[in-house]
Amino acid sequence: MPRKLNLNVGINTTGYLPAAWKYRSGNRHDIYDPGYYKRLTELAHRGLFDAVFFSDHPALMTDPNSRPFHTIDPLILCTALAAQVPDIGFVATMSSTYNSPYNLARRTQSTDIVSGGRLIINIVSSFNPNVAANFGSAPLPSRSERYAKASEFLDVAKKLWASWDPSREGPVPNEQFWDAASAHAIDHVGDHFTVKGPLNVPRGPQGHPVVAQAGASEGGIELAARHGEIIYCNILSRPAGQAFGKKVRDRAARLGRDPKGIRIVPGVVVILGETKKEALRKHELFSGAGSEDGLIARFIKENGIDPDGFNPDAVLDAERFIPDPNRLQAVGMGLGLSDLLTHEKLTTRQVVRRSEGHHRLLLGTAEEVADALIDLWDDGTVDGYTLQPPRAPDDIEEFVDKVVPILQDRGVYRSRYEERTVRERYGLPFPAH
Ligand SMILES: Cc1cc2nc3c(=O)[nH]c(=O)nc-3n(C[C@H](O)[C@H](O)[C@H](O)COP(=O)(O)O)c2cc1C
């Protein structure tokens, strides 16, 4: 089967860019209206996306000038949407630090069965202290502790997902209801979890939900290599993308895992215009910066640079932007920029037009955007993208109407849904027991 471009689309609240809510159609109550998410999912379905994507932090953002980005629980929402919109898949972000393996394995396997094999779970270890504060008085565990727990969490979840397999049933005597030997205890005893099992939900149509992973620190790469089937990341250029993909796949091979079971699916922010100039102007508005100077001023502030005497047209030193591996925020979010500057000599004025919200920024006409999307996909640097629209529904609708037809004309994107499960759509292997 010819290789096709995989596309997910983020549909959190009003869209990906915090300040872009001022330029969207709709009202502020959309963010907790199930009907609104149904309309977004139907729009994504019309665009034949592989899946809609929900990032998540179980904490309310309370900045009055920005929209809360995470509201209704993603797994609940995905389950409800799966009953209303056919074909399309669902990515629910869930924390391995603030969940239990048994409950998460049960809930996700249940959604995967209910949806007919359309669930992808994006396992994050959570890095936000406001999240930690909602789960007891203990501070956020260190990154290394979080990732050690995340790895064991997924080991346990996979054992549970495979623990009851009706296909293992033998002949069932008349007086018996079922062959209980088809369900095995897992008797897991580890550093972080003790779980007997079996799971009281049987194996689903995908074996288990597809496992996505975000986070690109050392711990994030290890988790991706061990368990990640779809890697959601920040890739701003070809050399950076190839280096990232090689790093994850080489680590997977060293761990005895077939790297062919890994798809690199970075985020991408697309802002379309009838002309490049129009797209540049929309970027200045949707980012909240107001102008190119505003974008530069924001960059200086976000990176703690002394504005006095700063020259936005001087080439930036990549070393200066390598994120502290122990910083609180996601290291992966910061690595995108330092990787870009490692491979390309760029000034601030150039950089602010290459990345928005830590993701690769594509500004231009539909043709130019389609060319850029195909560019990194064609040679295998990436397997697809998670489109992060500045505004929902507006930028999703524009992408579906203007960019999808070009991708289809180029023969790189589906013209109809064919495979039943998201695992099949991504060409991922069915998990062994
Ligand atoms: C592209 C991307 C998206 C992410 N989305 C989330 C998210 O929705 N929720 C979350 O808690 N962490 C998210 N993270 C952070 C990591 O998944 C994870 O929480 C980890 O603790 C920090 O990542 P790091 O390994 O890059 O430091 C994201 C990271 C990346 C690179």
Image (tube, helix red, strand yellow):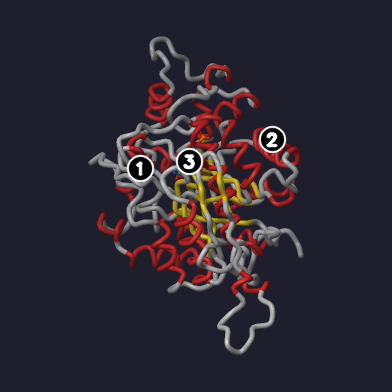
Q: Identify the residue at image location x=60%, y=41%.
A: 223
Is 311 situated above or below 350?
above
In which image quadrant can residue 362 be found? Answer: top right
Secondary structure found at label 2: helix
> Where residue 186 appears, x then y in whole percent?
59, 56
Q: At label 3, which amino acid type do we have?
A: Ser
Front residue of 141 and 351: 141
Label 1 neighbourhood size at 10 Å, few (<14), some (14-19), many (20+)?
Answer: some
Q: At label 2, which amino acid type do we have?
A: Lys
Most extreme residue toward the top, as rendered?
309
Label 2 neighbourhood size at 10 Å, few (<14), some (14-19), many (20+)?
Answer: some
Task: Give the numbered dot on residue 98.
Answer: none
Front residue of 55 and 401: 55
Tag 1 residue: 18
Q: Quadrant of the N terminus?
A: bottom right
Tag 3 residue: 125
Secondary structure found at label 3: loop
Q: Identify the residue at image location x=43%, y=55%.
A: 11
Q: Is mark 3 within 8 Å of ligand 1?
A: yes
Of callouts 1 and 2, the N-terminal one: 1
In which image quadrant can residue 117 be found? Answer: bottom right
Of callouts 3 and 1, the N-terminal one: 1
Camera sees residue 326: yes
> Where residue 83 appears, x then y in whole percent?
44, 73
